[in-house]
Amino acid sequence: MPHRAVKEIMFLRAVRVSCMRKLNLWRAQREGGESEVLPQTLRGRAFQMSGRGGPLLSKKTHVCLRQLLNISPTLTISICVPLVSDAEREAVRSDKNSAFLGDKSRGSEVQAQPVTGGKRAPRNTSVWSDMSKSVYVSKAAAGATVAVAALALLAVIGLVIFHHIRIQECPLPLSPTVMMSTTPVPTEYPPSLYMRLPGDLIPESYKIYLQTHLHTKLDNLDDQNYNFTGNCTVKFKCVNATNTIYIHSQQLNLNLIGVTDEHGNEMPVHHVNLTEDERDFVVIELVDTLILDGLYYLSLEFQGECYDIGGLSVRRYTADIKDKRYLASTQLESTVARRVFPCFDEPAMKAVFDFTIIHRKGSTALSNMPQKAQTEIDIDGEKWAITEFYPTIKSSTYILSFVVFDFDSKETNHGRYTLKTWARPEVIAAGYADYAHSVTSDILHFFEEYCGINYPLSKLDQVALPEFGANAMENWGLITYAERTLTYNAAMSSLIEKELTASVIAHELAHQWFGNLVTMKWWNDLWLKEGFATYLSYLALDKVEPNMKDLIVVREVQRMLDSESRGESQPVAQKEEEVQSSVDIALMYSPIVYSKGAALLRMLSESLAQNVFQRGLQTYLKMYQYDSVEAQDLWVHLQRAVDNSSVHIPVAAVMETWTEQVGYPLITINTMSGEVSQKHFRLQPDSGHNQTWQVPIRVMKSGSEDIAFDLLSVEGPEPKPLYRSDDSEWILANVNYTGYYRVNYDPENWGKLIQQLETDHQKIPVLSRAQLIDDAFYLARTKYVNITLALNTIKHLLKDTEFIPWDTATRNLKYLLLMLDRSEAYGPIQAYLRKLVGPLYDKFENFTQRSAVPDSHCAQLSQAHAVKIACAHTLPKCQKMATDLFTQWRRDPARNPIHPNLRGAVYCSAIGEGGEDEWDFAWEMLKTSPNELEKDRLREALACSKHTWILNRYLKYALDADKDDPLDIFSTVVSVSNNVLGLPLAWDFVRSQWSNTKYSAFSLGYIIEEVTTRFSTEYELKQIKETQQENSLNKFSVEGCLERVQNNINWVKENKQTVLQWFQTERTHGNSKA
């Protein structure tokens, strides 16, 4: 920084002190009635410092200061106006010299002056008034406001130092500043595309300098600097002649440097506007029209603040137990790149980005591309690093990223690319990032082979961020993860947590092709990246653990079949005009897009044959790499692959019935007549839509392993020979659960299928066994079949030890248990479940007694499932195992002998069977454990006690401010309510104590929804209504809850006696011991 500028800034700081002293004196005199006039000396300083009162400063510093003061009306007003009190403003309203700042007589926007002789006329000096619309001040107070504005901004005067770098390197001449107005801008857009960029200009490249003022290590939080500054030069092409530039900016203070053509000639600016709505447009109207196919440069300076969510965020974390550290990281999806720098912030507006990050010396900066160079600079006595990165390949704005931190990394060179996994130094040293690092290269290699295109970058950084709200973000070459997701501690993490780490990594790596390389044109087709990433992540997981791809059935397919049957639905792909605002876009990020999108792609892949599907995807990726697409582009390439195969399916015609309609069909097959039909399936049968799908159906018959294919395209019933069976022959549709729909049969075929399950269940594929259970229970809930038929589909589990059928059965039995575990039916139900789970528990008992686990992933899932069910339903050998292991831990708290896979079930059982000593031990472990996963298990297990006084004490602990640290009152109340003995305690707590919690009344509807899951009596329904009236809750907040409880009441009335008789009969049937 120039020596004279340093002296001048020091002088300005001294002036600030003097001016503030005079301003305070004036306030005191005015309050005493001695003066109403701002001191002349203060007014003089104000005008001198705003650049209107004489050559107080050198030209360079004067220009920098003016640019700083002109950055934003918002910043100026937010700093100045609070320093002039409401009373002071009110006192001068009646002043005869009062003026309305922003008076329309002065012009509602800043007008550039006419151009004469190639030179711009002097700027309109009304710029300050235009910045302060709707604020009345006297001339004296206006002078004070300007003075305080300048002086307050001097606290961040270091921001302007960055201009020296830009002046030296920016290829554009520095133009006189054109200030931004905030007048709404009339547009000629169609109403349906009101939120969109016009498309007249296409960005080609950005040159971005950004300085973050973050201290990565700081003792005093108040000293942290959350500001960032920078400048951005955008090179763009004009594809439709226009004289207006639209670009996005949100919550940034901007300063227009200028617009030039490709030859460096300045384009005169007529005026500049900031839209005051959610379009976030900066609208720059030029004097002249941009020439078709011409190249131009737009240069802007910007300043912003870090936010907790979205854009550039500062995160605080702890290093080495007590050392407080900070990091800066970006999260730009979907429309928040505009919060970090002005840009064409739409996914199809791809460009090359050239980043330079200025950060404090000693910290590390990463971005999408490898570091190109790094230099140091001294600014105001502080050392700064200037890190320049290589230009990106053609990218969308939402996948750009940078981080600034003090992390360590684990590194592996794979030849074409270098893989680094970054985390807090102690995490790397402990080896908690090793698993993620090791599986990443295997998964990335899978995608390179599957997609037929190599990973296009020379490096891949993965960063584990503490306190990161999302699971992960697929930024190209710089993937960010929540630390809890990317790290795996073998001593503490269960198999489910290990699976989560691998699956999230696979999901984000899939995005490097689906989303980053080939991008949807607009957010209405979000499923083209999220559906693909979800589906393909399961295929990639097989690279890490065999047979994991089948878990998509329980993790995605069944989840969505349940959700959509309740009416919680929207189309996977919506019309472009229906997805415009940021709210519309945010609503697209739903399980429908992720899980249903994945289920539909799986159905399509299996219908076409996986190799045909893969060939179509490869040509699709190669054709549109570095470009953007619509769904139709995908259908075209898949159809070409189909046309070159033996398959005959009209891809677009079939898939559009699934992606553009809500819900899914119930396929009904009469094997006696061969008739097949479809109908929209809903739990409320009369609430379905009159829709028809083109349904791919895979069919097999008993005695043959051949699978036939049919495409049902009408509502029906339609007779087809394929669906007719002989007297002894069964028919199974939707083989391997590949279709996204449910299937019902005539009673005779159901009977044959259930008989086959009981005699030799392996004749029916594993996934189809799960499908039969799931379909039968949902059909029973909608009265298509009797509840006893559904219960008969689980009888074969005495011999079946596969995880997916067991998980499906347990999830469906959960509702039945919730409805009947307070009734006389619960005894027979529990006895039968002990009998049913016995063989499964015995299979893994040798492992379990030693607190060991089998090798395979699915076997470990089955073992954990067996222990959870057996202990929950008081199988004696399981209870003894849990008590013994928990006792061993109590004897040596430093060494926990319980395998992480089993801890949740073992803790719950031991605390449930134990008393105060067991509970107090777990409470102490909760308070002292440094591991969040362990804390979560203990929090939930503490609610398993069978002593009501202990559960009551637990609720009071959660409410007690002194003991609130390890607990969250919301999750504690829900956990206690999940215990049948704790339900009345939790409900009473909600009614009497919820107003005393930090959540208070605004969340009462949510906690009522959670706690009343078991409610199934008229008295309980009445209690909810009373609580609603007592707390003046609106109908909407409890409407779903009331409807659910009424449905529960109806179900119990209709089914309890039948269920009781079935379990009483089956409990004593056979030779298995309870």
Image (tube, rainbow, N blue to C red):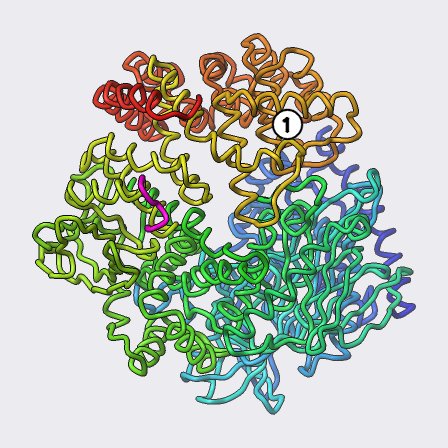
Q: Position of residue 175 (x, y in %)?
A: 65, 77
Q: Which residues are magenta?
A: 758-763
- Camera-side residue: 226 or 667? 667
Residue at x-position 40% and y-position 55%: 593
Compared across the picture, whether 861 is left or right of 51 comes to left
Residue at x-position 57% and y-position 8%: 949
Compared across the picture, whether 594 is left or right of 439 comes to left
Look at label 1 and name its amino acid: Leu
- Camera-side residue: 897 or 114? 897
Residue 297 occupies which quadrant of the picture?
bottom right
Q: Is residue 730 magenta?
A: no
Residue 1004 occupies which quadrant of the picture?
top left
Can you identify the residue that label 1 sits on?
Answer: 938
Q: Is residue 761 magenta?
A: yes
Q: Magenta: predominant secondary structure element?
A: helix
- Camera-side residue: 189 or 538? 538
Q: Quadrant of the N terminus?
A: bottom right
Can you say whether 767 is above or below 887 in the image? below
Residue at x-position 39% and y-position 69%: 610
**Residue 507 appears anywhere in the view:** no
